[in-house]
Image (cartoon, helix red, strand yellow):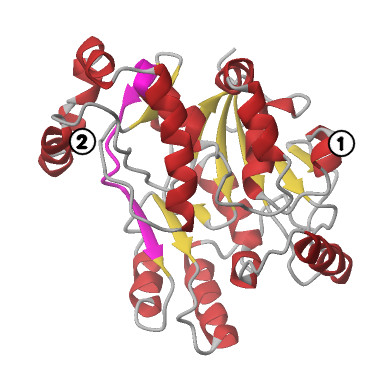
Amino acid sequence: MNEIDFVILWVDGNDPAWREEFVRTRQAENDDASEIRYRDWRNLHYWFRSAERFAPWVRKVHFITWGHLPAWLRRDHPKLHIVNHRDFIPAEYLPTFNSNTIELNIHRIEGLADRFVLFNDDTFLTRGCRPEDFFRRGVPCDMARLSVVQPSSVGHIIYNDLELINRLHDKRTAIRNHIARWFSPRYGIVSLLKTLTLLPWGFFPGFNDSHMPQPYLTERFRQAWERWPRELDASCRHRIRSLSDLSHWLVRYDMLASGAFAPRSMADCRLMTLTDDSLESICRDIERQRWRMICLNDSEHISDFDRQCQRLCEAFERILPEKSSYEI
């Protein structure tokens, strides 16, 4: 089958019931996670508008939620599958406020297509996309570029993923066996030079993570659970993100090291961090549809959240003014 689904994770950080359970779980886990991670920029409806306008070929949208739903969402839409955490995540991992746990169990969603694209609610399409932007020759499109992991809380999780990858794959053999995929001209000279610079390392020091909508095959998740059942089980028992977590990048890194991907350029994609200084230029990029896909990374450097939120929505409204069929 050539069908492709979209999967999007969403949380309403303003829901009192969610907040009560979140605070209770956070205290039990002795966690001090920043609530910025769960802040709502009130632009989810633009995600649905962009999916309908720029990727009308999508078979189904799987909308993953703790249980709350936007008031404007048309729940009976034929392409929409509303998925509660308890519908697919094993009971021993619930309740969870850990996106890594949610994403590592994605393959358990009932009715999920063999090929799907994983979105977070901060990733958007802003220009027309084709199925070939995500899958070619039956495998996900991706960029194999070596990188060095930067020390951070997320970096610790990536280190955990890389430890398992380096146990399984010999770097030199993996690259030699798939040399054309690792050194595709699609990547551009800068990316190729970065990979060349890190070739002498005897192991995978890291992969470039674009933080864009990520295409996957469901079978790769099943294989990961067969290969690392103990490690994945331990990770998924963390109710809130932990430094010892694994992430869905583990599946992606295994895919890259195995050569199970088709090379693509990421020149039409952009990760942008929302700050007081950057927001206006980000909005201009959205209005001009400069990029095909974007990730809007939240940060603590927003002084007037409501005003900046309104400005960002105005930018999306310029390119997506009409309601989608997902909206009441």
For this orientation, the residue located farthest to the right is: 17
Q: How far across and down, in percent of the image, does residue 192 sit?
A: 14, 35
In the depicted view, which residue is nearer to us: 202 or 66? 202
Q: At label 2, which amino acid type do we have? A: Tyr
Residue 164: in magenta span: no
- The magenta stretch is 257-272
Label 2, label 1: how far apart the Cα atoms are: 42 Å
Label 2 neighbour load within 10 Å: few <14, some 14-19, many 20+: many
Q: How far across and down, in percent of the image, does residue 32 sit?
A: 65, 69
Sequence-first tag of 2 and 1: 1
Q: Which residue is mark 2?
A: 187
295 vs 178: above or below = below
Report if residue 308 is visible in the image. Answer: yes
271 vs 207: above or below = below
Quarter holding residue 76? top right
Q: Which mark is residue 157?
A: none
Quarter holding residue 190? top left
Question: Quarter of the image containing the C terminus?
Answer: bottom right
Report if residue 59 is visible in the image. Answer: no
Q: How far across and down, in percent of the image, does residue 39 sit?
A: 64, 70
Nearest to viewer (mark 2 / mark 1) = 1
Element type at marker 2?
helix
Quarter holding residue 136? top left
Question: Quarter of the image containing the N terminus?
Answer: top right
Q: At label 1, which amino acid type do we have? A: Ala
In the depicted view, which residue is nearer to us: 56 or 73? 73
Q: In the displayed structure, does residue 146 sit left or right of residue 262?
A: left
Q: Which mark is residue 91?
A: 1
Label 1 neighbour load within 10 Å: few <14, some 14-19, many 20+: few
In the depicted view, which residue is nearer to us: 233 or 65? 233
Task: Identify the residue shown where x is 13% and y is 29%.
Answer: 200
Task: Identify the residue shown where x is 54% and y is 61%.
Answer: 320
